[in-house]
């Protein structure tokens, strides 16, 4: 590339807010990625699903252990009470108490909707470390950092790109956008209502908005959350998954 073109390209990138700081970008992504992660976490949350034709609200309780294991149980409404999801490493099962049946979720269904919401099975039990699975670049605006994530060659994902907006002064995410392989925006997740849980500040509400379903959204709001407690191993078992919940 001729020197003059190289200089002009460099000036353009700087004026657009591009920052050549791979370490800074990776460090910031790591902070965002670990906001909700811990050695273990126990949470109670409310999920509200909205469509143009109906709405439903569920109360959930979840237990997680690192990136590998997750257990989620629906507490209400009554008709869904006891429905549960278990993920152990790379395997996942759902339990439906009305028919007393455990159904294994195949890898092909991980991007399918969880309980009719706009969150996928993969979203609820995500085991991927964004820092390890994506190349990241950092764009700097006046008050916002934007992280641009591109999947590495060996990353298994349906997303062609992910963008995350982070507030500079708090380092809290405010929006995460998902693009397909054609770089078309598919969905956005908005973060708000920052609150302290177990001494850790996190956005307590996340709203997923699919751009191919007008009028649809799913909001998850944490009611309480504790981190790094010792959890009994039996929680993460098929036997516990099938335990009747009264």
Image (spheres, rainbow, N blue to C red):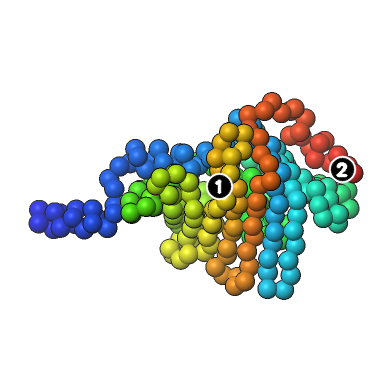
x then y, percent, for residue 146: 39, 52
Q: How many marks?
A: 2
x then y, percent, for residue 152: 42, 46
Pointer 1: residues within 10 angstroms few (<14), some, or many (20+)?
A: some
- Per the image, label 1 sits on a secondary structure element best described as strand
x then y, percent, for residue 68: 62, 36
Q: Residue at x 34, y 38 (%)?
A: 23
Q: Which of the image's four quarters has the N terminus?
A: bottom left
226 or 86: nearer the eye?
226
**Where does label 2 land, which residue?**
245
Q: Which of the image's four quarters has the C terminus?
A: top right
**Where does label 1 land, which residue?**
194
Q: CA distance from mark 1 to mark 2?
A: 32 Å
Left or right, 10 with respect to 181, comes to: left
Left or right, 213 with respect to 186, comes to: right
Taking 148 as reference, is 38 above or below it?
Answer: above
- Per the image, label 2 sits on a secondary structure element best described as loop
Q: Give the numbered dot on residue 17.
A: none
Residue 190 placement: quadrant: bottom right
Q: Residue at x 9, y 56 (%)?
A: 4
Disc 1 and disc 2 in contact, CB within 8 angstroms? no
79 or 160: nearer the eye?
79
N-terminal of the pair, mark 1 or mark 2, is: 1
Q: Residue at x 51, y 48 (%)?
A: 156
Tell me, yes or no, if residue 1 can be seen here.
Answer: no
Question: Which marked residue is nearer to the observer: mark 1 or mark 2?
Answer: 1
Q: Residue at x 68, y 66 (%)?
A: 50
Left or right, 91 with respect to 206, comes to: right
């Amino acid at each position: 590339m001729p020197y003059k073109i190289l200089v002009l390209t460099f000036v353009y990138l700087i004026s657009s807010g591009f920052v050549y700081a791979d370490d800074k970008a990776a460090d910031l992504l790591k902070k965002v990625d670990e906001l909700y992660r811990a050695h273990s976490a126990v949470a109670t949350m409310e999920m509200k699903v909205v469509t143009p034709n109906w709405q439903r609200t569920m109360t959930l309780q979840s237990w997680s252990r690192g990136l590998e294991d997750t257990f989620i149980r629906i507490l209400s409404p009554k008709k869904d009470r006891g429905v549960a999801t278990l993920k152990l490493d790379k395997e996942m099962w759902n339990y439906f108490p009305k028919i007393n049946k455990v159904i294994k979720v195949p890898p092909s269904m991980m991007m399918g909707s969880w309980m009719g919401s706009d969150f996928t099975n993969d979203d609820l039990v995500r085991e991927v470390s964004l820092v390890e699975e994506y190349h990241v670049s950092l764009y700097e605006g006046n008050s916002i950092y934007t992280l641009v994530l591109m999947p590495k060659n060996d990353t298994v994902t349906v997303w062609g790109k992910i963008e995350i907006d982070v507030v500079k002064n708090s380092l809290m995410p405010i929006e995460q956008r998902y693009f397909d392989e054609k770089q078309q925006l598919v969905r956005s997740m908005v973060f708000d209502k920052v609150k302290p849980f177990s001494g850790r500040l996190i956005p307590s509400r996340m709203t997923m908005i699919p751009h191919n379903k007008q009028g649809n959204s799913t909001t998850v709001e944490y009611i309480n959350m504790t981190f790094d407690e010792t959890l009994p191993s039996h929680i993460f078992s098929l036997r516990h998954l099938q335990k009747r919940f009264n």
